[in-house]
Image (cartoon, rainbow, N blue to C red):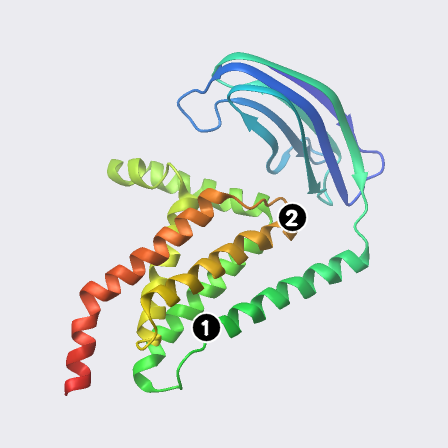
Amino acid sequence: VQFVQHIQLNHRPSYLKLKADMKCSEVIPGEKKWDSARLLLFQYDYLDQRIQTPHEIISISGSRDWGDYHRSFAVSHFARKLKVIIKLSQCTGSMWVKNLNLVPVQKTQFYIWGKRVLFCSWFMFFIFLFKLPPSEKKYIIPKIILLGCMVMILFLTIMPGDNKNRIAKKIDAQILVSKKIYKNIISKDVSGTVHFCSFVLFGAALCFLMPNEKRSHILTKILLFAGGVELMQFHADDRTPQFTDFFLDALGGAAGIIIFTIFFSKFRNNEFKT
């Protein structure tokens, strides 16, 4: 079941905000994670071809009282028409929507530059958080792994939500044609898998580069890094911090510390003896 509203763009703003009040009752999701009560927005070009992936304003299930939901998004230069869809996608239950509004949003140059300065400040904080040892040959590879993980994590953090979702869907499409075991393990949460694996490598490399640091201190730094990464998403387009991502980051960092301690500490001790 769905309701569709077409909107012609006579004057194309740079940013728009779609907001609405919604509630649902006894919505039971379907087999796929997007089978729920949803509010979506699509962009179309002058050939009536859809641009990018749809903007998901909210996806809810179960029973919820009235709530105010909204999301801002960038309007494509090729957009000529918008389509707002309210739907119960392959699920059962009831949903209600009221006060549906689509309004233009103006982002000032001060806001844009302020956001860039904030991201640079976060990055400098992370650099000073981890005091790395001198540039010796045995530290080159762990440093590359550590800095590579840090850059990848920060890049994925500030990436606009639509770009992230588009990449995740492409990965999902590749998993669907691969072995069933990978489909069952990975495709349930591509983003969570990336979070966890990145912090496993990050934690292990950090232990190698800080051999004299207490494991509890290293874990504390990883928690500060993971928390800072999530807080950065308050200022990234179409992104919101999530406790589940922070939990996966912390769990991955702890797993990296444990893996290093169990499998690599003995080899490092032998190296120092020789």
Q: Nearer the viewer, residue 22 or 221?
A: 221
Residue 190: horizontal and vertical position, in percent?
A: 41, 43
Q: In the figure, is residue 81 to the left or right of 170?
A: right
Q: Nearer the viewer, residue 47 or 113?
A: 113
Residue 176: horizontal and vertical position, in percent?
A: 35, 36
Mark 1 belongs to which amino acid? Answer: Phe
Q: Quadrant of the C terminus?
A: bottom left
Name the residue rendered at 68%, 30% in the picture: 48
Residue topped by disc 1: 130
Callout 2: 10 Å neighbours few (<14), some, many (20+)? some
As displayed, is residue 39 above or below residue 263?
Answer: above
Whole-angstrom CA distance, mark 2 to mark 1, is 27 Å
Name the residue rendered at 53%, 59% in the picture: 155
**Disc count in the image?**
2
Q: In the figure, is residue 177 to the left or right of 271?
A: right
Mark 1 or mark 2, which is nearer the start of the sequence?
1
Mark 2 belongs to which amino acid? Answer: Asp
Marks 2,1: beta carbons within 8 A = no
Residue topped by disc 2: 237
- Would residue 183 be seen by someone viewing this image from the given angle? yes
Nearer to us: label 2 or label 1: 1
Snapshot quadrant of residue 171: top left
| Secondary structure category for the residue under label 2 | loop
Residue 135: horizontal and vertical position, in percent?
A: 39, 86
In the rendered image, the residue lying farthest to the right is 11
| Secondary structure category for the residue under label 1 | loop
- Would residue 159 be seen by someone viewing this image from the given angle? no
Q: Quadrant of the N terminus?
A: top right
Q: In the figure, is residue 168 to the left or right of 139?
A: right
Callout 1: 10 Å neighbours few (<14), some, many (20+)? some
Residue 117: horizontal and vertical position, in percent?
A: 69, 66
